[in-house]
Amino acid sequence: MQEYGNLNKILKSKSFVPMEELKKQLKKNEYKTRQDLLNFLNSELENINPNINPDKCKYLYKIFRYFENVRDDRDKEQILTGLKKTTKLCKSRLNKYKGQIDSDNNIYNKILSIIHVTLLNLANEKKEIVDTKETNNNNISVLRYIIYELKNYNYLFELLKTFPKYIMSKNENGQYLVEELIDKYIKISLSKEYNPDIIYYEKVIKLFIDNPKFTPESNFEKQLLEKIKSNIKNVQESDRKDEEKQKSFFFLNELIGDIKKKDVNNKTLNDVAYKYDIKPNNTIDFTKEMLQNITIDKNKFLDLRNLYTITIDGPGTSLYDDACSIQKLENGTYLLSVFVTDVASFVPRASLIDNMAYEKAETIYMPQKVITMLPPGLTKTLTLKENQDRTALGHFFILDQNMNCLDFRVQRCLINVDKNYNYNEIVNTITTSKNYDELEMINNMADVAIKLHSTEGNRETYRALKQLKKDVNTNGIYDPSIGSLIIMEFMTLTNYYIADYFNQHPEIPFIYRINTGSYGEDVKKKIIELSGSNIDIKKLKATYNAMCPPSIYSTQNLGHQGLNLKSYCHSTNPLRNYASLECQRLIIDHIINDDTNIDLEKEWIYIKNLCNYMNDRLDLNKTFIKECNSIKKK
């Protein structure tokens, strides 16, 4: 830091020192002066207190004034190189301190916002352009940085909206930038493996070619189509596998449709599933062959098939991941048992079926269709259907009258569910049942769930908002029924105690579900302000997204603010969520078996990669569902 002492002093002075004066004081040329500014900025951000008030960092904001009105290509490249490091550093710090700093008002987000403005300024050449079809090529590096490095579609959208002339940008070879993007898209489409980046590049290409300001030469479209058709012909004549050819044909035809600005494929839901690399349920079902090779020593399982056990789910559900039972003991405490179907025993890691499940990441609910994460035959075999013997992981809680947990343990069990209830049936049972044992158990469940619910702080707000976000366009409402409350509280309790165990053993890698939003009175007040007979859907969504960021998977436990919990995970739905399946394997290895022969270093790498993959894949699945819904409307 000592080497920047003079620069530090100048920047912290009250007045702004122009570049010419700054060069004199530092005794350096402009290039080296700007390099010092960039290095000083990154050095400060490396060592700054993450909780510092951003208003106290005005001396850092001054640095960006020296990057204004830059026209020379070499100078721009120098600034972009430095800002790439700054962007990476800020994002790294945001990830490191997530949950420990103000999610909106912090120095790192402030710097990233200023970088965004700086990129716009770098792109905004002051030169007059005589012919609107001719675009200055000096800005290609800025556009490439946003497209290829940041991969930020929203930044690019704003840039092109602010400076529409850059729609016509050309690279150093005189090629339109969109042609360069199309070449990138074609290259990905011809690769043997599926690359989700192809979806991103398709969006970017459409952003250019759909813009009214994009007015290339009259033969431009014809030349592009000839290039694509030539690639189709090359694939056709190659000796590649049929499935590889099919993938390339699909994406190349998709590009043809985008260029012609019409859907040449007349896409169906299956076409969209193919585009997002989501394989249908009927691809292959290995269940029977696989089950024959699975042997389970039932002597190692606690036999609880005589224990009265039920499942509670929404109407129409046919997948039962979890079941529960409760007993009120003589001393007034409760023994709560939560059972989760034992998928891990039947789906070994890296097996063929495991790989298929990993690719989807979850069970996907399309319009009028469900694509299950696991093969349907296996799902049917493992679902906790009533009157069927099943293996399960049993989670046992001793709870006192105040809902303090006196004991918690996990054990493999054999169970036989007595009844599959839906939410409505639970309400009817409480009011009409003449079966004393059934009525007593459900009343005890309701009693415990209500007590757990009363200690939750803002959890109800979080759940209501989460449901609102899902159903805002269809006027859907949060289901407050007692059946829904029972199962949500019991699963939340289970996921908390599993996550808490791993949090107490930080040497073991684990998949936490984290959320750093805010769900207090400020959120309630804002939602009330926006709600009413003339609710603005766009404003409501924007408010939700700003105040209630989505939960993500992470190996770093930052707590779940929405549920008001210090630790949380997804471990209770392994039939339909891959993170749950992997959590179940970790539970078996580290809690039940206490296996000390596992290579933790290798497992850490695997779990970190899995968290990143799950977050990306689930976002891709949301985009897929959105596109399916648009096709359904058409």
Image (tube, rainbow, N blue to C red):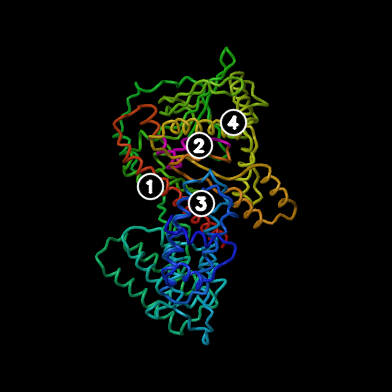
Q: CA distance from mark 3 to mark 4?
A: 27 Å
Instruction: Answer whether residue 84 is magenta in the image.
Output: no
Query: Which range is magenta?
Result: 564-585
State the residue position of label 3: 366
Outermost residue, left side: 239
**What residue sits 38% from the left and 78% below the top?**
172
State the residue position of label 4: 486
Q: Say whether disc 1 or disc 2 marks the residue closer to the N-terminus.
A: 2
How crowded pointer 2 is (Cα within 10 Å; few <14, some 14-19, many 20+) is rated as many
Quarter of the view holding residue 246: bottom left
Q: Is residue 551 left or right of residue 380?
A: right
Q: Say whether disc 3 or disc 4 marks the residue closer to the N-terminus.
A: 3
Q: Say whether disc 1 or disc 3 marks the residue closer to the N-terminus.
A: 3
State the residue position of label 2: 568
Front disc: 3 or 2: 2
Up/down of 216 relative to 16, above or below: below
Q: Nearer the viewer, residue 479 or 141?
A: 141
Given the image, on which type of amino acid does mark 3 rest? Met
Provide residue 606's location: percent of width, then percent of height: 35, 43
Up/down of 179 relative to 630, above or below: below
How crowded pointer 3 is (Cα within 10 Å; few <14, some 14-19, many 20+) is rated as some
**What residue sits 36% from the left and 64% below the top?**
188
How crowded pointer 1 is (Cα within 10 Å; few <14, some 14-19, many 20+) is rated as few
Front disc: 4 or 2: 2
Q: Say whether disc 4 or disc 2 marks the residue closer to the N-terminus.
A: 4
Given the image, on which type of amino acid does mark 4 rest? Ile
Q: Say whether disc 3 or disc 2 marks the residue closer to the N-terminus.
A: 3
Given the image, on which type of amino acid does mark 2 rest? Tyr
Q: CA distance from mark 3 to mark 2?
A: 28 Å
Mark 3 residue element: strand
Question: Do the CB atoms of the residues marked 1 and 2 lie less than 8 Å apart?
Answer: no
